[in-house]
Image (cartoon, helix red, strand yellow):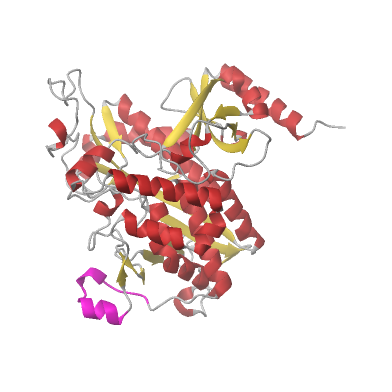
Amino acid sequence: MGPGPAQQQWGDARQAAAKLDAEGVRAIALTWVDNAGIARTKTVPTARLAPAVQRGVGMSPVFDVFTADDAITASAHLGGPDGDLRLFPDLDRLTVLAAQPGWAWAPVDRYDQLGAPHPGCQRQFARRMVDRAADAGLTLRMGFETEWVVARAPGPGGQPGGAAGTGRLDGSAGTGEPLEYPCVGPAYGMSRVVELSDYLRDVAEALALQGIDVLQLHPEYAPGQFEVSTAAADPLRAADDLVLVRETVRAVSLRHGLRASFAPTVAAGQVGNGCHLHLSLSRGERSLHRAPDEKWGLDPDAVGFLAGVLETLPALLAVGCPSPASYLRLAPSAWAGAYQCWGVENREAALRLVTGAPGDPDGGHAEIKPFDAAANPYLAVGAVLAAGLHGMSAGTALPPPVAGDPGALGVRERARRGIVRLPSSLTESTDLLARSTVLAEAMGEVLHGAVIAVRRAEEAHFEGVEPEEIAAATRWRY
């Protein structure tokens, strides 16, 4: 009789550790993402990988109610010094980190001391929603666009270039002095690629060595801003990939004397960093975006799914736009998707239908525009799946698509067409999340309550704070 699952895992972990050791890897970062969108970690020596896989690594459940600035709040179920969880690394995602020599990485699932799944585990929430979709006969693929702004890291004196000063990249005491960008080329300009060709090459190389399939890597609109788009994958893998992409970009940046910000708003008044979520649906080998006899080319199940996402989007913003800084970015006429509408190839609509060429296997999908990189990617994919599956089961219909910029329409015309502004504050979106029976049921009481508690704490912390101060306070947190 062969080894049982636990023995097999132990054996697999020992083999993996031996292989890592032979490659010079001496430590492994085990990460999860908290409800504020911060990637937290415990690290173990490579020799301790097998015990970590067998028994887990201890970590307090209080991190579920941490805010982005490391303050601690509480929910009805979580908070305080009591309790312990076990972090179990996913060996299937164990990855040698190309930009951090001697290190590897793996995401974790969290369980209680008795081996039961932790009800607040965001990664297991995403997995449950993937399983729920599979039970409905659906296969989903998702991919993220990651935007970031790169600036020069502080010199020995604290200021860019080493001048004596305050130690802040944005100048003294949040006065709004400009960041020092390492490139001066125009938006989407080839000159930015020329200026930072070594840096961008190293980002691309590191991602490729880690098995990340990059579709595009290019300059973006704001000063010092770039974007990397990764290939669609299983939703759980897509969320893992996003964590790995972000930390890889951060590591490569530091090796070049730069600092990367994934914050929704890096400088108040400028275009911020989005993290658009792309998704496609299929049944078996049949794409639900390739129904030539149906309106918009969408199978009725795809219509229901996308309509469910669109209908739930105001509450979903508390998941996908979870920071007070998110609402500085989410402005009309900025291609951020500030109105609750959808459109065919409309980059100003919150939900964009991408038709793609008829023979393109990667064409035919949808894009959720408002989300940003402050979001926990596991919460984002799980919540979108829950909303879409509810819409599909309820037979929710899509309203007529919107062409052009809804922000350019008059108030009466928007009202006539049923186009409403998405929440313009974290308070508003969190109120809607609190009342969402769809998302509450999907998340469960513990996770739903913890997310709301963190949002309320961050609302209170930034109440009455000027946009410039919000941007400065959150710039380097994500």
**Does residue 290 appear in the picture of this structure?**
no
Task: Name above or below for residue 322 compared with residue 261.
Answer: below
Query: Percent x, y for residue 228?
Result: 36, 45
194 or 130: which is nearer to us?
130
Quick one: 70 or 237, which is closer to the camera? 70
- Give the left or right position of residue 161, taking residue 261 as reference: left
- Determine whether, in the image, residue 182 is placed left or right of residue 366: left
Question: Magenta segment range?
Answer: 401-417
Q: Point out residue 73 in the picture as x, y percentages from the top left corner.
A: 41, 40
Considering the image in quadrants, where does the C terminus appear?
top left
Q: Is residue 233 magenta?
A: no
Left or right: 278, with 257 as reference point: right
The image shows residue 173, relative to residue 460, as above or below, that is: above
Q: Residue 257: x, y in percent?
A: 26, 25
49 w.r.t. 429: above or below:
above
Q: Quadrant of the N terminus?
A: top right
User: Which is more toward the observer, 183 or 426?
Assistant: 426
Residue 411 drawn in magenta: yes
Q: Report the side of 174 relative to 78 (left or right).
A: left
Q: Residue, x 47% and y 46% (percent of image)? A: 450
List the single residue furthest toward the bottom: 416
Q: Say whether residue 269 is visible.
A: yes
Image quadrant in which you'd find residue 424: bottom left
Please name the residue shown 40% across and 33% down the image. Answer: 248
* Residue in front for this viewpoint, 241 or 472: 472
Extreme residue in the right direction: 1
Q: Position of residue 236 (x, y in %)?
A: 54, 47
